[in-house]
Amino acid sequence: MHDVPRVGGKNASLGEMFNRLRSSGVRVPDGFATTTEAFKLFLQHNRLEAPLKAVFQTLDMKQFSNLRETGAQARALMESGSMPPVLSKAILEAYRDLCARNGGDKPLAVRSSATAEDLPSASFAGQHESFLNIRGAEALLLAVKRCFVSLYTDRAIRYRQDHGFGQLEVLLSAGVQLMVRADKACSGVAFTIDPDSGFSNMLYISGVWGLGENLVQGTVNPDVFLVFKPTFRHGKQAIVSRKTGDKHLSMVFREDSIVPGENPVVNVATPEYKRTQPVLEDAGIEELSDWLLRIEEHYGMPMDVEWAVDGEDGKLYILQARPETVHRKKDPHLLERYRLKGSGHALCSGNAIGSKIATGKARLLKSPAEGDKVQPGDIIVTDLTNPDWDPVLKKASGIVTNRGGRTSHASIVARELGVPAIVGTGNATEEISEGAIITLDCSSGQTGKVYEGAIPWETEQLDFSALRTPETAPLLILGDPEQAMNLSFYPSRGVGLLRMEFIIGNSIRIHPMALVHPEQVHDAGELAEINALTAGYDDKAAYFVQKLSEAVGTIAAAFYPREVVVRMSDFKSNEYANLLGGRYFEQSEENPMIGFRGAARYLHPAYREGFALECAAMRRVREQMGLDNVKLMIPFCRTPEEGQAVLDQMAAHGLKRGEQGLQVYVMCEIPSNILLAKDFAHLFDGFSIGSNDLTQLTLGIDRDNALMAPEFNEQHAALKAMIALLMLQLQDTNTPVGLCGQAPSDFPEFTEFLIKSGLHSIAFNPDALLRGIALMNEAELKSEKGGKATTR
């Protein structure tokens, strides 16, 4: 890396890895680089310094109104030059040596590397040109010259100006490497942190079939793999999430095109069987993950890495590694929260980049040449973007594209500019009208929506640095893995309630028993939908186990090593019936709230096999992924005998309480749980009060009955008496007791009551956590002043 002034950031980094990390197994293609002295020699030989200086003196530094003309003049000057004979000779000698070391003439990749490139403060990603599949001496010399010319692309000129670099102080090196034949295999981009949230314990790996340009441009939806660093380092199978993109196109080389400047590639349709096949199997993901950790540890900072598999030798290679420039400087104690204050008609949706909201006038553009239409604050709507768009995107308050994933060009630029983007909508340019006022909402997880009109929204600055953490543990209520890494920065001590049914309903969508017995689903349309969702799985039940374990694993990893209490599924029969295939396995109940739910369901033949799948998924999270911070919780357990039977079933499925530190809690939501609290405490490791159900069964009010809603009161004296009785019964058992619900964040007096009662934890919805902590702090201070502090 000390050679950055001689060979630029990209080539210095490649040399660093080639020389320092090869011994640990990291594979980088062999090659050589021209130096910045060679670039100076090119300028001197052709007497270009003075003419270039004169050209850049005419550049409009404020509005960049003549950027295109200035860039064209600079490139024309460079094109007019010829290679100095001494430089041509040196390049060809190095080329012959490279071929001799590697067994004969090989296709080459020739890449630009600027002295201000791939730095922690400025990435310059995509600003200069690369030339692939170069063959022969003549084409190589032309490619090196074209790299020199690309120092003055319009986008690079603007980028240098925006980042305070003089136009003539930046020099360029050309890197010449053996070509990795990713066109015959796959390639991708990886980050050693989550690129959206900045969560540092996750590796983010994305990939496509063929060359990686389809990924960068966002032409196809890639495969995405998340790997949890801490447990991966301990030898666990730490792939906590796999998402298979459609990958409908593969970019390959045109074998007849070897002249730099000609388009050397073509997109071909990916064979159907490969679209659902992951680009990397587990062994490949693990090898790449190991290299990513070595690279990050070597550089001592988060990294953005390009990788590829060579289809001829079958080996994995690292093509580039640069510092990640967006999140590495952020203070994790300072967050900004955006929230819509209204609702509206959603025009389209896609991958949310960032967590912000923006309102502005839509500008539908077909190319960056139409950039003059864009005024500051407009929202750019287009099919996809590439680095030529960079000067235009800088004007926008938001970006919307038809195509693209989280590592596409539009996504990377949006993060760097700090503006929201929604990419991969599929239909934005059809649904959004030119000049229409629209609102981009990226505040609700990984799916962003574009709304018609100006919807009011608000921001809140969150500073956790001086926040007092109450003695009573503040926890979160959570069910959406897409929000987990963002919420991990909140000042909670973990997740007090992870609702499994939210994951089943939103991510899996199929009744567990319909996956065990698909032959009992007789509706052709439903069966077709089930088959489509489980495509690529020989065993449909394995789909359930993988999807559930990865969703829970993502949340558990985000909060590791803090506790995550996972409640086993608590759908009611009418809710189960709404899942795909569900109506074939559920009976109609008059009052499902007090019917076939919870522990009784797990033990019944009608669902026993479904419960086995839930247990298999949780065992996979704890044992294979190594996420032993997961605790399990049994809902609606009516009697100690029922509780014991469920624990026996779990043990039979490899989840034995006490083994490998497994703790099992019980929901406290039925009066019998309180009246027989000591008996339940002998069976379970903790209690979690479900205030809604406990209110329902204490007051005899169906909480789904709208007529009775005015009588439903979580703060009723009867409910408080039940909680007080529970704490009295457990005062000698040291059993932890928590509560999950909305009331503690809404009513200070209820929070004060809970604190005085001696509860160990209170779980809040994310939007109520900070207010809840404030109320807990107030209640604890009152208890201390009043001499009634309790031991927890």
Image (cartoon, rainbow, N blue to C red):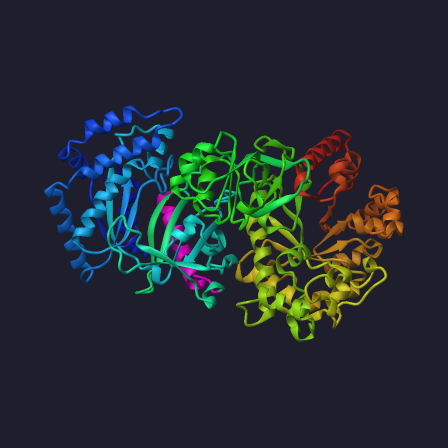
User: Looking at this view, is 584 or 781 the one in front?
Assistant: 584
Residue under the point 47% across and 66% down = 272
Q: How many marks?
A: 0
Where residue 705 appears, x then y in whole percent? 85, 51
Tell me if residue 245 comes above or below residue 516 in the rendering: above
**Does 281 lie within the magenta span?**
yes
State the extent of the magenta-drawn residues as a range: 277-300
Where residue 125 appears, x then y in whole percent? 37, 42
Q: Is residue 474 left or right of residue 376?
A: right
Residue 267 placement: quadrant: bottom left
User: Looking at this view, is 69 or 326 the one in front?
Assistant: 69
Q: Is residue 763 left or right of residue 397?
A: right
Task: Give the dominant element type of the magenta stretch: helix, strand or loop.
Answer: helix
Tell me if residue 64 comes above or below residue 610 in the rendering: above
Q: Is residue 359 visible?
A: yes
Q: Residue furthest bottom?
A: 519
Q: Quadrant of the N terminus?
A: top left
Residue under the point 75% across and 30% down = 782
User: Looking at this view, is 253 or 602 the one in front?
Assistant: 253
Q: Quadrant of the C terminus?
A: top right
Tell me if residue 521 comes above or below residue 144 in the rendering: below
Residue under the point 74% across and 33% down = 779
**Does 706 lie within the magenta span?**
no
Where residue 67 appears, x then y in whole percent? 34, 31
Q: Is residue 447 visible?
A: no
Where residue 58 appears, x then y in whole percent? 29, 24
